[in-house]
C-alpha cells in the first residue's frame, strides 16, 4: 500500500483501522509496521477530524418557531369539487369539438381540390416520363 492510498483511506474511513474495509486492513497494518511515524500522524489527524464530526449536531428548533412556520403555511384549497371538474371538462370538450370541426372542414375542402379522375392522368404522365428516361439511357 502506498502512503497516498493510506491517507485516502484514513480520510474516508477515519482513524480507527478497524472501520476500514477488511480487504485493505492487512496492507494498512504492513504499512503501519514499516512506517510507524507516518501512520501515527495520519491516524491522529483522521481521529481529530472524527472528533470534530462526532461533536457536530444539527440546530434544534424551538416549539414556538415550529408552530409559527406551520401557521404561516398556505392552507389547502377547498370547495373545488364538482363545479371545478365540470368547468375543466367543458373546456376540454370545447377544444375537442374545435379539433373535430377543423378536421371536417379540411376533409371537405380537400375533396373539392382535385377529384379521383385526375389521378389516372397524373400516373400516366409520370409513366411516360420514365419511358423517355429509359430510351435515353439505352441510347447512351
Image (spheres, rainbow, N blue to C red):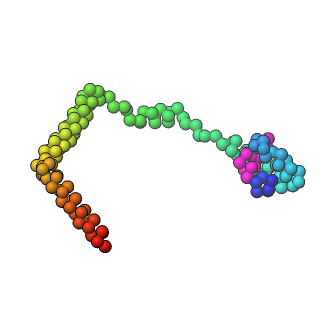
Q: Is residue 61 magenta?
A: no
**In this rendering, does residue 101 appear at all?**
yes
Q: Height in image: 75 above or below 138?
A: above
- What residue lies at 74% left-to-right and 49% top-to-bottom? 9
Residue 101 image position (x, y, % from top left): 16, 41
Q: Which residues are magenta?
A: 8-18
45 versus 100 height, above or below: below
Image spot of residue 13 (x, y percent): 73, 45
Seen at 27% across and 70% down, the residue is: 136
Overall secondary structure of the magenta section: helix
Residue 41 appears in the picture as rendered = no
Tell which of 132 and 99 is nearer to you: 132
Q: Judge by depth and name the residue closer to the eye, 135 or 90.
A: 135
Q: Quadrant of the C terminus?
A: bottom left
Q: Can residue 13 be found in the magenta stretch?
A: yes
Q: Nearer the viewer, residue 6 or 36?
A: 6
Q: In the orientation shown, which residue stands out farthest toward the right?
A: 33
Amino acid at each position: 500500500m502506498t502512503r497516498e492510498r493510506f491517507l485516502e483511506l484514513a480520510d474516508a474511513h477515519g482513524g480507527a483501522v478497524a472501520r476500514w474495509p477488511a480487504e485493505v486492513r492487512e496492507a494498512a497494518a504492513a504499512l503501519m509496521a514499516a512506517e510507524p511515524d507516518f501512520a501515527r500522524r495520519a491516524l491522529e489527524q483522521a481521529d481529530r477530524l472524527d472528533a470534530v464530526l462526532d461533536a457536530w449536531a444539527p440546530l434544534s428548533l424551538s416549539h414556538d418557531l415550529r408552530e409559527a412556520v406551520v401557521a404561516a403555511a398556505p392552507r389547502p384549497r377547498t370547495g373545488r369539487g364538482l363545479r371545478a371538474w365540470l368547468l375543466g371538462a367543458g373546456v376540454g370538450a370545447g377544444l375537442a369539438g374545435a379539433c373535430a370541426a377543423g378536421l371536417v372542414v379540411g376533409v371537405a375542402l380537400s375533396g373539392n381540390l382535385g377529384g379521383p379522375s385526375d389521378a389516372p392522368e397524373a400516373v400516366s404522365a409520370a409513366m411516360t416520363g420514365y419511358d423517355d428516361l429509359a430510351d435515353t439511357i439505352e441510347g447512351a
